[in-house]
Image (cartoon, rainbow, N blue to C red):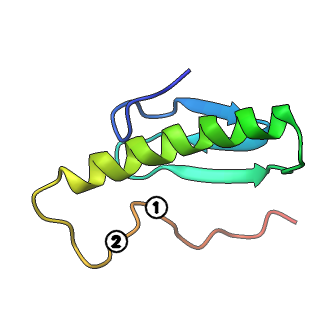
Amino acid sequence: MAFTPFHDQGESLSIGGLTLENGTVRIALYGQLDIRQDQESLENLRALKKEIDAIVVSLEQQKSLPAHAVSDEVTHAMKNPF
């Protein structure tokens, strides 16, 4: 199942043990993908390449990309509850 990069916040896709999590501002990749010399690994790599290629195309189509985007995470100090 493919997703449209940067268009569906919260959508995720698993390839082996690797997860691609789609968002409107960023796409997160996390987990582990073991690559062996077998058909399953080849299929996983082809699926990953398809998604990475779609992300690259999406970024290339943008008119102006900043050198470095600011994180959209909002963090603040919290009192330790313990």
Q: Which of the pair 66/48 is nearer the observer?
A: 48
Please state if 9 lies on the left or on the right of 67 as rendered: right
Residue at 62% x, 31% y: name it: 13
Query: Outermost residue, bottom direction?
Result: 67
Residue at 55% x, 45% y: name it: 49
Quadrant position of residue 9: top left
Quadrant position of residue 45: top right
* Residue 34 coordinates in the image, percent (x, y): 86, 50
How many other residues sit within 10 Å of disc 2, few (<14), some (14-19) or many (≥20)?
few
Please state if 76 lies on the left or on the right of 59 as rendered: right
Please state if 52 lies on the left or on the right of 79 as rendered: left
How many other residues sit within 10 Å of disc 1, few (<14), some (14-19) or many (≥20)?
few
Please state if 11 lies on the left or on the right of 57 as rendered: right
Residue at 41% x, 67% y: name it: 71
Quadrant for the C terminus in the image: bottom right
> In the rendering, which numbered label is found on residue 50?
none
Task: Check the image and report above or below for 13 versus 61.
Answer: above
- Tell us which disc is closer to us: 2 or 1: 2
Q: Which of the pair 80/12 is nearer the observer?
A: 12
Residue at 84% x, 51% y: name it: 35
Q: Which of the pair 2/10 is nearer the observer?
A: 2
* Residue 10 coordinates in the image, percent (x, y): 51, 33
> Residue beneath label 2, please?
70
> Residue beneath label 1, please?
73
Query: Outermost residue, top direction?
Result: 1
- Residue type at mark 1 is Glu
Q: Secondary structure at mark 2?
A: loop
